[in-house]
Image (tube, rainbow, N blue to C red):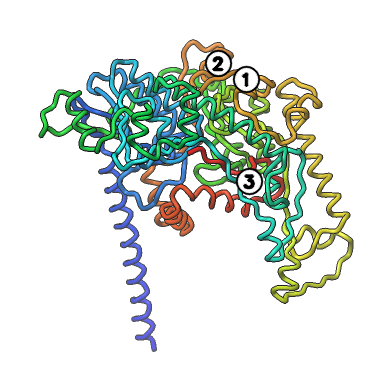
Amino acid sequence: MGQFFKFLLASCLGIFIAFFLMLSIGGLVISQIARQADRPKDIKPNTVLHLTFDDPIPEQTNNLELDPFDFKKKKILGLQEMLNTLERAKEDDNIKGIFLEVDGLASGGLATSAVLRDALLEFRKGGKFIIAYSKYYSQGAYYLASSADLLMVNPLGIIDFRGFAAQVPYFKDLLDKVGIDMQVYYAGKFKGASEPYRLNKMSKENRMQIREYLDDIYENFIQDISVSRNLSEERLRQLAADYVGMNPQAAAEAGLADKVAHRSDALEELRSRLGLDEEEKIPMASIEEYNRANPGKKDYGIKNKIAVIYAEGTIVDGDGSPGSIGDDKYAKYIQQIRRDENIKAIVLRVNSPGGSAMASESIWKELNLARADGKQVVVSMGDYAASGGYYISAMADSIFAEPNTLTGSIGVVLAIPDASELLDEKAGIHFDSVKTGPYATGITPLYPLSPGASRILQKRTDDMYETFLARVAEGRKMSRDSVNAIAQGRVWTGEKALEIGLVDRIGGLDQAIASAAAMAELDEYRLTEYPRVKDPIQQLIEQWFGEEDVRAKAVLKSELGEYYPYLRFVQELKDSKGFQARLPVWIPFN
């Protein structure tokens, strides 16, 4: 028997050592692959930047859930770093132009696209060319490509130029069929986040607000393309109404494109502009490769600093994951900033549709404490700064928004499922209880809420709405009634928000940083960024040897493609706890 246990222990020890060695070797292999991929590429004279925008563009570099199956591309540039890289390329004599190939453009907000488009136009002003080619131009892709001096489309391609639409799913009939009653409590007649559970179509208030901000954004879209393509706004609207882009030849004749051609023709055009022979290889570099080769410099000898806090994604309780705003994690960052005497100002870059009301309050409180400690606080809004995203912004000394930013949505919503019919009549599961008081069972999906509990929850919702109004009134120096008149859960574009006093200026992150420096009376300063994003190699190893959920999400994202945000939105609603301050639904503009 003793010999048996000896062999058993030896076998277990061998298995443990083998497993440990496999983990170590696997980690080393992944690390080596990643390091090889991250090695800077030499930028030769006569180089063309090859821009595809295949990946989502986060506000901060790598501040998103990275694909654990992608061992080659380990750095995903944030918007600001991408803009800075394009500015350096504009001044670099080795870079002659840009080849814009946007077949796989990742969907995103129009505010981000507009900022990128402006950067491409600035690049051209430096005397350099941009050639755009695609087999399929989504509207977002075409918006970026309209900055090119030569726009080419495949002979069998499509320019999907047709106007914008917001499509909102409604679940009430489905929920009724399966026996679930969503008990919804909300404050704000425009707070559309509650409507999918209690209605089968848009309310007139929600339809009106979506129509208004969709028209505003579409107007900016048309105006920008009108200037760069030298077509009247009226003509562009008619081309969209006629869906001319479905026929590439007709699109070119109408002026939406310059030439119908194959990719090989686009490459020949590049060779011609670079002065290369037919057989010569075109020197190309992606924007990530160029960034690694020419990363820019930061003067660490400068003492005074401005902290740039990137608040992007859904606002959640706890630490959250990369690409979300966890109140515990962000509270710690702000506390660190408060203790750092060299940080004189904070610029909060917000790109968030909102989320947890409680988490929003926690972040608001920490930012207020930072102001009380003498830190200047300036907000810069991206694609979204709505509901909870506006909650954390309202206390700032100054607020900047892009023209196409979606903001406001000052309102609160709570939805609690009642699954008693599903369980009792359809599944045959019956619950009974013994209680010491009328509310002893708490808030549960097992029973419908009593009239008394419903009154309590509606009162709680109204109280939270009043707190939201008070936070905005205090921060914007407005009366409660003045805020209420423009609140009610209503969504505004950045331009309209400026008119009604919810923001102070139209501008981007650079302008917000300059404003913060002026407020803090800083002649020279350097930037320090939060959150502290982990090294991509470290993230990769943690993903592979961490939770299975990360890899499952990556597979779903790969399979669903442009439809993944819809699934993510539903998952966020499922995982949400307590009262929510968020936009009604994710609305794509591609």
Q: Position of residue 499 (x, y in %)?
A: 66, 19
Determine contact: label 1, label 2, CB under 8 Å: yes
Say which label, 1 or 3, has the lower sequence index.
3
Callout 3: 10 Å neighbours few (<14), some, many (20+)? many
Asked if 361 appears above or below 237 in the picture, the reply is below
Using residue 54 as the reference point, say whether residue 304 is left or right of it: right
Question: Separation of disc 3 and disc 2 at Cα?
Answer: 31 Å
The answer to which quarter of the image holds residue 492 is: top right
Q: Which residue is mark 2?
A: 515
Kind of residue at disc 3 = Asp
Q: Position of residue 373 (x, y in %)?
A: 65, 23
- Please state which of the two labelled residues, at mark 1 or mark 3, is closer to the viewer: 1
Kind of residue at disc 1 = Ser
Q: Which sits in the foreground, 40 or 143?
A: 143
Regarding residue 366, the answer to whether it shows in the image is no
Say which label, 1 or 2, has the lower sequence index.
1
Q: Which residue is mark 3?
A: 317
Q: Residue at x 52, y 33 (%)?
A: 310
